[in-house]
Image (cartoon, helix red, strand yellow):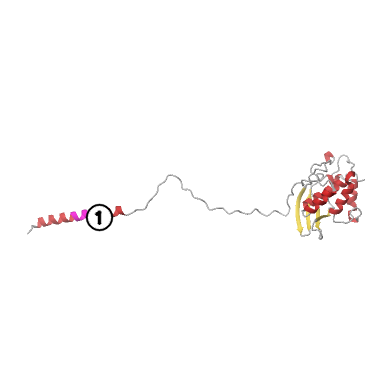
């Protein structure tokens, strides 16, 4: 029989061996397991933002600036008619054609063509004798500078002298009233405020014509000397 001291010593040895075995087993178990991987980086993290949806531009206001003059000027009735048929659905172009017709009328060499141009572009029939256009005709005959003043190059200081074959009409506003009416604002260099011109759509052709323009020759500063451009 073992003595109590011997038994105790033997038991301690057995216990120590068991603890070592258990520790070794746990260590191998831990080594065998894949722990979470943590990637370290000194670079800042880049976050791609979500794409930004495009936003439509706000609608144009009713009054808007008009493009510059057309590239071609109607020096003949044939060119005028061709342009009116192809571009007469644009109020701004029709207004420019109107002034081209007046400038051809005021030139003795093209007066006959000018009369036909205005007959086409004006809503009133037989415009030369129409009662409602009597003041208009008188102003064309006696104060033609009123109409030259609407070209960009004209001024009271230069007597409203312009190149009628190469000019830019100063249309500063355009407003659609309804399907049959359109209003333009045209700037004269002889006054501080723009003048209104009303256009009407021809039901037969679908093209615009000049209807009302009674303010266009009011309040225009006269030139220092009248250029004496009179219709024969």
Is 114 part of what is drawn in magenta?
A: no
Q: Position of residue 147 (x, y in %)?
A: 84, 46
Quadrant for the N terminus in the image: bottom left
Who is closer to the viewer here, 8 or 84? 84
Total of numbered circles in the picture?
1
Q: Is residue 66 left or right of residue 100?
A: left
Query: Element at badge 1?
Result: helix
Q: Which residue was labeled with disc 1?
A: 25
- What secondary structure characterizes most of the magenta part? helix
**Region rendered in magenta:** 16-27
Q: Position of residue 127 (x, y in %)?
A: 89, 54
- Within 10 Å of disc 1 (Cα), the crowding (few <14, some 14-19, many 20+) is few
Q: Is residue 125 left or right of residue 19?
A: right
Q: Residue furthest left?
A: 1
Q: Residue at x 14, y 57 (%)?
A: 11
Q: Residue at x 21, y 54 (%)?
A: 21
Q: Is residue 144 left or right of residue 64?
A: right
Who is closer to the viewer here, 133 or 29? 29
Q: Is residue 221 above or below residue 84?
A: above
Residue 106 appearing in the image: no
Residue 97 appearing in the image: yes
- Quadrant for residue 33, please give it: bottom left
Is 22 part of what is drawn in magenta?
A: yes
Q: Position of residue 202 (x, y in %)?
A: 81, 58
Q: Is residue 151 above or below residue 212?
A: above
Q: Position of residue 198 (x, y in %)?
A: 81, 55
Who is closer to the viewer here, 136 or 83? 83
Quadrant for the C terminus in the image: top right
- Quadrant for residue 149, please give it: top right
């Amino acid at each position: 029989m073992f003595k109590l001291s011997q038994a105790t010593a033997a038991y301690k040895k057995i216990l120590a061996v068991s603890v070592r075995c258990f520790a070794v087993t746990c260590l191998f178990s831990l080594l065998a397991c894949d722990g979470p991987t943590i990637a370290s980086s000194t670079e800042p993290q880049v976050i791609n933002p979500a794409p930004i949806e495009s936003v439509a531009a706000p609608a144009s206001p009713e009054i808007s600036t008009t493009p510059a003059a057309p590239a071609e000027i109607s020096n003949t009735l044939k060119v005028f008619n061709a342009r009116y048929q192809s571009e007469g659905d644009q109020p701004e172009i029709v207004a420019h054609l109107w002034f081209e017709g007046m400038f051809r009328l005021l030139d003795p060499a093209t007066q006959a063509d000018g009369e036909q141009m205005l007959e086409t572009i004006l809503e009133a029939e037989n415009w030369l004798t129409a009662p409602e256009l009597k003041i208009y005709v008188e102003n064309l005959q006696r104060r033609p500078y009123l109409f030259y003043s609407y070209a960009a190059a004209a001024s009271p200081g230069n007597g409203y002298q312009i190149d009628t074959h190469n000019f830019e009409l100063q249309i500063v506003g355009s407003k659609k009233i309804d399907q049959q009416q359109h209003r333009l604002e045209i700037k004269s260099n002889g006054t501080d405020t723009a003048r209104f011109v009303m256009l009407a759509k021809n039901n037969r052709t679908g093209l615009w014509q000049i209807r009302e323009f009674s303010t266009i020759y009011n309040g225009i500063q006269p030139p220092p000397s009248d250029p004496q451009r009179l219709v024969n």
